[in-house]
Amino acid sequence: MHLIDEDTALVDAALKGSAHAWEKLVRRYEDRIYNQGLRLTGSRSDAMDLMQEVFLGVYRNLHRFRGDAKFSSWIFRIAHNKAIDMKRRKRLMPFVSQSGDHEGDLLDNFPGHSSLEAEEVFSEYENNKAILSILSQLPMHQRLIVELKIFQSQTFEDIASIQEVSVNTVKTRFYSALKKLKTILEEKNVLS
């Protein structure tokens, strides 16, 4: 069964009370939502909070999913809105935490990856930290588009629907973000 069709079938089953279908939907998207939250907030605890808020919002509003768009577009729209709400609420300072988060508790806070070797988790953490450092220099509207296009493989049309803007606006923001990222990377290479 095609992933989109399977998502729709799982939504239908969850709406009819199937806990198994709901759990399968959560498992299917939890890593992607967590990683999106991590890249947008720069904090594991904020990413976990965001993920919890997203799934709570999805659960409460599952009956509103009409199937006009892909379920993935719908859930990422919710994640997009929750990330903006979180930023407004917390007035997030720099997105890369300097608070001394320790890698030691990473295994406890990394959903769905308890079987990974500690070295693999730490390596992934270090890579995410470098990406977060660069992405944190983009304005939120550009960071969200980069997240959806590059990390979530959404189409420009899907992103336009999620952000409720035109496809041309999405493309302009995306290419502007890429240009800014290129400049940041060039400056890092010159300075390092």
Image: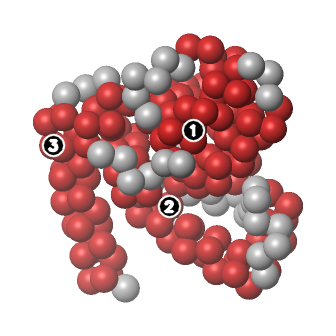
Please say if the residues under marks 2 and 1 sit with CB atoms less than 8 Å apart.
Answer: no
Above or below, 100 against 152 in this view is below
What residue is at 55 percent from the left and 74 percent from the top? 127
Please say if the residues under marks 3 and 1 sit with CB atoms less than 8 Å apart.
Answer: no
User: Which numbered mark, 3 or 1, is in the foreground of this view?
Assistant: 1
Q: Earlier along the polypeptide chain: callout 3 or callout 1?
A: 1
Residue tagged by mark 1?
7
Q: Amino acid at mark 2?
A: Leu
SS at mark 2 in the image: helix
Question: Horizontally, is 38 left or right of 120 in the view?
Answer: left
Q: Gap between marks 2 and 1, in whole Å?
A: 30 Å
Q: Position of residue 55 (x, y in %)?
A: 69, 32
Residue tagged by mark 3?
172
Q: Residue furthest front?
A: 1
> In the rendered image, is residue 135 in sight?
yes
Residue tagged by mark 2?
132
Depth order, front residue of 97/77? 77
Q: Residue furthest top?
A: 64
Depth order, front residue of 8/101? 8
SS at mark 3 in the image: helix
Q: Amino acid at mark 1?
A: Asp
